[in-house]
Image (cartoon, rainbow, N blue to C red):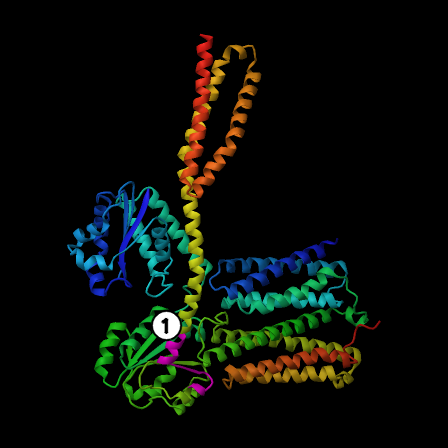
Amino acid sequence: MSLRLLGVNHKSAPVELRERLAIPEQSLAEATRLLAHHPGVREGMILSTCNRVELLTAHDHAAPDLSLFLEQYFSIESASLRPHLYEYREQDAMRHLFRVASSLDSMVVGEPQILGQVKQSYSVARQVGAMNGELDRVLRRALTVAKRVRRETRIGTTSVSIASVAVDLARQIFGSLAGKTVCLVGTGKMGQLAARHLMAQGASHLTITNRTSTGAEILALELGAEVLPFEQLYDRLDAADIVITTTGSSEPIFRREHGQQLLQRRRNRPVFFIDIAVPRDVDPAMAKLEGIFVYDIDDLQGVASQNQSGRNEEARNAERIIEREVERYTESRQALDAVPSILAVQRSFETLRQQEHARNAVRLASLDAEERRAVEDMTRNLLNKMLHGPLTALKAAAREGDEEAMRAIREALAGEVADASNEDDSVKGGAD
Amino acid sequence: MVMSLLWLRVAVVLYGASALVAGWTTLREGSRVRSFLQPLLIGGLLFHFVSLVEVLNNNHHWMPMAVHELESLLGLLLAGLFCWSFYRYGTVSLGMFVLPLVFLLTLAPAIGPDFETFFSPRLRNGWVLAHIALVLAGYSALILSFLSSLLYLLQEQRLKSKHAGPANRWLPPLDTADQISYRMLLIGFPCMTLGLLTGSLLAESSIGPSYFSDPKVLLSFGMWILYVFLLWTRRSAGVRGRRAVYLSCFVFLVALSVWAANAFSTVHRFSQP
């Protein structure tokens, strides 16, 4: 059984092509079924996310033409598809799958969604009966490896987007966000995103204020927030624990004196200012006040970059884990390849042993049951001991993928059996 | 080997394991070994408590009368307070500092004989137990408050410097460190107050009013006034953050000097027969 993986991802293909190749969730089962019936494919799975479409197959003899499957399924010309395709076989296919499941091949390394998407594709492939042998084992191992990478490295523990860094910082200041009030000043896209993230992570209350109240009202309706008239901002800001500011003002709207008033009214409870505006809405002097934490867009970007560097470091550890897992799996797979040969050898020698017993049945007839059992055990143990060396060598050769050595051992053992049978025959013939 | 020593050694092993788990969990975020911390700690507390009760019972005195017994009691109180804060706030990082201290405080009584015992007949008074236990509880709370304050300072410095990336992520959230520090002060205050009160009454009855001129006693009352001031500034004046942390640290240092003042005290000396 051979493995093959073919696909496109965010590195190999532009978004226009990836859009054309995306398979909607509701069509995934049908597409997987078609793949499983594609000529040459024995088992198959399709992984389709916004950043990649990959076909993973297992086949017996001739490798299937998977790019033809993509061309037919998506009705796409070969010339516009083939230059963007990548293909991996055997160990390389396995390695790529392990890397994808462990989020090492993602656009944002360490993002957690990809593991869920691989699980989903695996589940669909099993449901439609497209996976039931070797590929099933590979996928199960891929999921185990991905979990191991999550467990043993810190690849996914830090935030790398501006909005998630803001949430992370808020947690480092306040611990839990439960009961915390967020005030969004301005209705910029990035601010909205940060506010949504904070609310999704447990912040209890959101107020929105904007110079033009219409924009604030529409957004407040959408987010279930309260609208704060802009002219009341300074009077009612003390209720907010986290202030996200994203106005287009050319001058800072929060100055040091506002911060001092705020701290006085809040009895020095900390406030976190997320200043996403350019030019900045918060006077940098305010950050010097104790109890006020100000992060502007560059600071947030800086933290995101530090976290990204940390992830890259962890990614190197993850690559080492994956390399070891690929080796382990390959070894165990090759050892499995030796199983039919080992069973065949054991069967032949067992037949020979039984024939020998049958031949001596008359001479052993005088023995009682216990003595006969002792002779039976003795011959079986003797056979096992004699075969131990050759079979161990056979397993080792399989693990190393040394086909030559495997054939030589098999032939030598088969020769032994044949010689023994011939000897039997000649003895029989002589007796006749 | 007496059973109390066996229980104490089991407690030491469990505390040691808890300290390792706390350190590992703090430095390896998301580690699954975190779930072992609470059972190990509770196990350690139980064995420690049983051991201490047995020691006091076997020696027919219901108060610590030796340095090792005092260390053991302080360790038990520290472990108990940390266990509470872990249950309440879920912050392990404090344990990275507290649990090794608990381990060391209990290790000495668990491995070696006690050479320094208190012989004073004045210690044969039941009120002394209350005095010792309450003052030690006050000290334990101050130690935890101090450690939590240090973590607050580190976290604040980290967040203010804008280097809030992957380095030092083990530090507790700022607000949590502040709350632990404040709660510990609140827990420690009644203990310290009642401890000093019982100590004063005992000294008054046995020595007379002259006890008040003793440097140890004077420092103790000075520390208590500072303690009251600290709580007042936090509760009424709303002082928190760095200034509150500095105050906590100052009170802790005064408490240490009160402890050290035993060397100069004429009233609070019990080791001479």
Q: Residues within 10 Å of mark 1 (few under 14, many from 20)?
A: many
Q: Is residue A21 left or right of residue B182?
A: left
Compared with A378, B7 (above or below) is below
Q: Residue at x 35, y 77 (%)?
A: A182
Location of residue A38 in the rendering, given as x and y in whole percent from the top left corner: 21, 45
Q: What is the chain letter for disc 1?
A: A
Q: Is residue B257 visible?
A: yes
Asked which quadrant contains residue B13, the reply is bottom right
Determine which residue is flagged by label 1: A203
Reply above or below: B132 against A318: below
Determine which quarter of the picture holds residue A241.
Answer: bottom left
User: Is A118 positioned to the left or the right of B97 in the image?
Assistant: left
A393 is higher (above) or lower (below) than A141? above
At 68% from the left and 58% from the top, the residue drawn is B8
Frontmost residue, A254 versus A221: A254
Q: Is residue A53 above or below residue A195?
A: above
Q: How many marks?
A: 1
Q: Quadrant of the C terminus of chain B?
A: bottom right
Residue A21, given in percent of the width and then of the height, sits at: 21, 58
Q: Residue furthest top?
A: A432
Q: Is residue A206 left or right of residue B121?
A: left
The span picked out in magenta is: A287-303
**Amino acid residing under circle 1:** Ala
A378 within the magenta span: no
Residue B77 visible in the current orientation:
no
Reply yes or no: does residue A290 show up in magenta.
Answer: yes
Element type at marker 1? loop
Looking at the image, which residue is at 22% across and 77% down?
A218
Q: Position of residue A240 (x, y in %)?
A: 37, 80
x and y percentages locating residue A19 in the rendered image:
21, 62
Q: Nearer the viewer, residue A92 or A268?
A: A92
